[in-house]
Image (cartoon, rainbow, N blue to C red):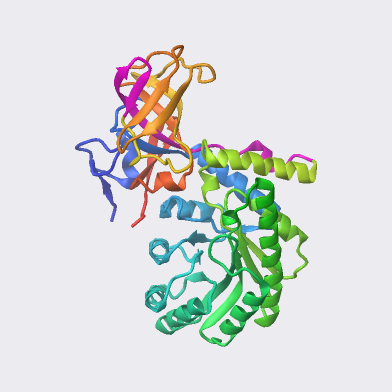
Amino acid sequence: MSEFLTELYRGIPIGALTPVDGISALNLNPARGNMPLPALTLDEEKFQANVKLMLDYCKNNGLLIAPHAKTPMAPDLAKQLIAAGAWGISVANTQQAAVMLGHGIKRLILANEIGGQQSGERFGTLLAHYPDAECLAFADSPACIDALATSSKVSGKPVAVLLELGAGRAGIRNLSDLQALADHAQRQSGLISVKGIAAYEGSAEAATENLKIEKIRELLKLAICSAGIVKQMFGLDKVIVTAGGSSYFDLVREAVVQAELPGLTPILRSGAIFFFDHGTYEQSFRRLRDRVNNSTGESTPLDTGFSPALRVWAEVLSNPEPDLYICGMGKRDVSHDIDLPKPLAFYRDGQALDVDLEHDKFSITQLNDQHAFLHSTGQAPALRPGDIVEFGISHPCTCIDKWRLILGVREGRVVSAYKTYFG
């Protein structure tokens, strides 16, 4: 049965009643203002170009990818990634796993520890509901192994486990602890099925970027070595090593290329890269591309670059001071944990205003719950209430989670809607 959208979702006009897959019939266009603002949009052409670029990169470098679904928590987008060639989807907890499994996704990495015995029972109940699903769970302690053994008893089949290494967040830190954890897992034979090693390199912190990269390389070297140990201990023909967020996946590729381990199956978990942004990932990708080019001495397919696909749209509400505009968007609508949103374009009566953002300086200086403080220089063109501002965002993960609906656009017009499930 089709789900219907009403004004209870931001961006949907009052009085509208439309099935999710029929939203294009409303002819909504945020630049025209014929829909309630603020609204979050996804440029579908840019998104699909990002998907192709990343999937081609993985294919050409012998990498699999299970994009982290915590970024959009939109099953329909996750299915698009799988259809494009992704191995599966990563999630951060049991609730997210339940959402993806409930929408027909069959292969997951639960990229986190699950908790204690009660969490083990809940996870086992979930696995029992989806007996045909393949779900790999992280473990970094005997207590976590024991909780997953409980999951196995509840679900009636062994739980697939990746032993997690870490640098700065969860995960064991050295080979001796890895060996002890593997020994404990081996004693749970029949309940626990160790499939490989997991890590997350992005949480490795250091005083400088170069020191951080050294720390990441050490973590990945430890991961490859650990993979060899568990491959031999558990008699695995293929051993998984999963790592790789959206900022340092090139270093994972480097470690895989240097590894001499037959049967190594590398799986990236980059998720935000498919949405990209006008802030943190734009900056980190510039560093990533420089690393790749400096190490190979030649251009790579990544030189074409990813494109920011997300926008938040808002109206100018007030002009209380000569160079201050208050816009109808705030902390409840847009990410602000790393960078503030960036104005990209301005519209009046559906037409783009002639604003040269290289010279006409506009910037967001502050956000309240529902208000954005947009400042301009004295040379910038004057705005007025009712003008619409198109904003780029920084950090997709903490922007999308504020929305129950992502509106897909093509050539400025809303053509699709993706429901999110953040719980």
Can see residue 385? no
**Residue drawn at the location 28% of the way across and 51% of the way down:** 3
Q: Is residue 155 above or below residue 325?
A: below
**Residue drawn at the location 39% of the way across and 74% of the way down:** 119
The image position of residue 413, as x and y in percent, is: 39, 32
Q: Work out which quarter of the rendered image holds the N terminus and state it.
A: bottom left
Residue lying farthest right? 297
The image position of residue 46, as x and y in percent, is: 52, 38
Q: Please tell me in which quadrant of the rendered image residue 179 appears.
A: bottom right
Q: Is residue 324 above or below residue 25?
A: above
Whether residue 316 sits left or right of residue 130 in the image: it is left
Q: Nearer the viewer, residue 409 or 240?
A: 240
Whether the magenta-drawn stretch holds residue 324 is answered as yes
Q: Is residue 213 above or below residue 406?
A: below
Q: Work out which quarter of the rendered image holds the C terminus and state it.
A: bottom left
Magenta stretch, residue numbers: 298-327
Can see residue 249? yes
Whether residue 191 sits left or right of residue 126 in the image: it is right
Q: Is residue 265 above or below residue 319?
A: below
